[in-house]
Image (cartoon, rainbow, N blue to C red):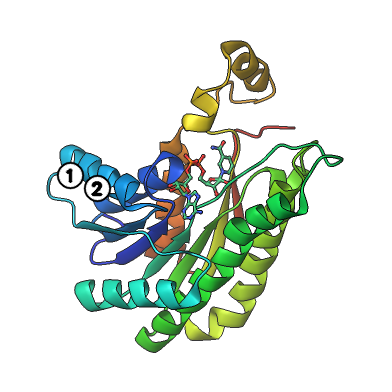
Amino acid sequence: MLLQGKVAVVTGGTRGIGFAIVKKFVENGAKVALLGSRKETVDKALQKMKEELPDAEVTGYWPNLMNAGEVEEVFTKVKDMYGSLDILVNNAGVSARDSFYEYKPEDFEKVIDLNLNSVFICAQAAAKIMKEQGGGAILNTSSMVSIYGQPAGVGYPASKFAVNGLTKSLARELGKDQIRVNAVAPGVTRTDMVAALPDEMVKRITATIPLGRVGEPEDVANAFVFLASDMASYVTGEILSVDGAAMT
Ligand code: NAD
């Protein structure tokens, strides 16, 4: 019960890595607000969580993460309902693999908007509350491509490099307010995206991973539990790779 009594908001909490984070947080004693892009997917995720963990204290919202007013309103609601806001996980993200020659500027903007601008907006809204209450933890989902880049779809690695920069800089700026800021950089993780890949491709990817398997959402979620907990009380500004030592 590493997160007993803590209150968390997890963006992109409806499926994949985000859903696993919400579940692990609840199992560790946290109350959680999961955020998604639509009411239907949020309701579905809440239903699934109630089936898997009937006593879970979980609620859900679907603000536009690029709209500071909507985000502030939701975070204030969560704080008023549960008494505090101790942990924010900026996990919502999109990727695109277009060739650079065909990459449309509007698609680049879309990736940067969700993967970077929303992290800025959510972190700012949460930090204001955390500063007032004496501290907190802001965690971001980066990616292993934030270290190596990737050979197509440049918007995605660019956004994740920027997330690392935001993480390290905010750790330095917000330390004085006892707000820790860290990121987790997952390798290839078995979410819907990976499940849809042909077996042959998964085999090829697996061959490049020293641990001999792709990551499970729970592998990634465990790292978030650690960084969110008081076990990581002196860890800030860190980008923690959870990738089986994959080399791309
Ligand atoms: P996913 O596609 O399964 O889930 C994405 C989540 O983001 C969903 O909950 C969705 O509701 C939310 N989302 C998407 N668009 C949104 C929008 N416009 N507004 C609000 N929410 C929106 O993805 P995943 O694989 O679980 O990825 C989660 C995070 O992990 C992302 O930041 C991704 O970049 C990162 N990541 C994933 C992998 C992987 O292999 N799956 C590897 C490295 C990093």
In this rendered view, identify the residue nearer to me: 177 or 8: 8
Q: Secondary structure at mark 1?
A: helix
Q: Residue at x 83, y 42 (%)?
A: 100
Q: Residue at x 77, y 44 (%)?
A: 149
Task: Identify the residue position indicated by label 2 in the image.
Answer: 46
Q: Secondary structure at mark 2?
A: helix
Q: Is mark 2 within 8 Å of ligand 1?
A: no
Q: Amino acid at mark 1?
A: Lys
Task: Identify the residue position indicated by label 1 in the image.
Answer: 50
Give residue 69's quadrant in the image. Answer: bottom left
User: Eyeballing the image, is 223 above or below 167?
Assistant: above
x and y percentages locating residue 235 in the rendered image: 53, 65
Q: Residue at x 47, y 31 (%)?
A: 192
x and y percentages locating residue 102 in the rendered image: 82, 40
The disc at residue 70 is: none
User: Eyeballing the image, is 155 above or below 214?
Assistant: below
Q: Residue furthest bottom?
A: 132
Q: Quadrant of the C terminus?
A: top right
Q: Residues within 10 Å of mark 2 (few under 14, many from 20)?
A: many
x and y percentages locating residue 107 in the rendered image: 69, 50
Q: Are the residues at dot 1 and dot 2 in contact (C-beta closer than 8 Å)?
A: yes
Label 1 to label 2: alpha-carbon separation: 6 Å
x and y percentages locating residue 153 in the rendered image: 74, 41
Q: Is residue 65 left or right of residue 134?
A: right
Give residue 71's quadrant in the image. Answer: bottom left
Q: Amino acid at mark 2?
A: Leu
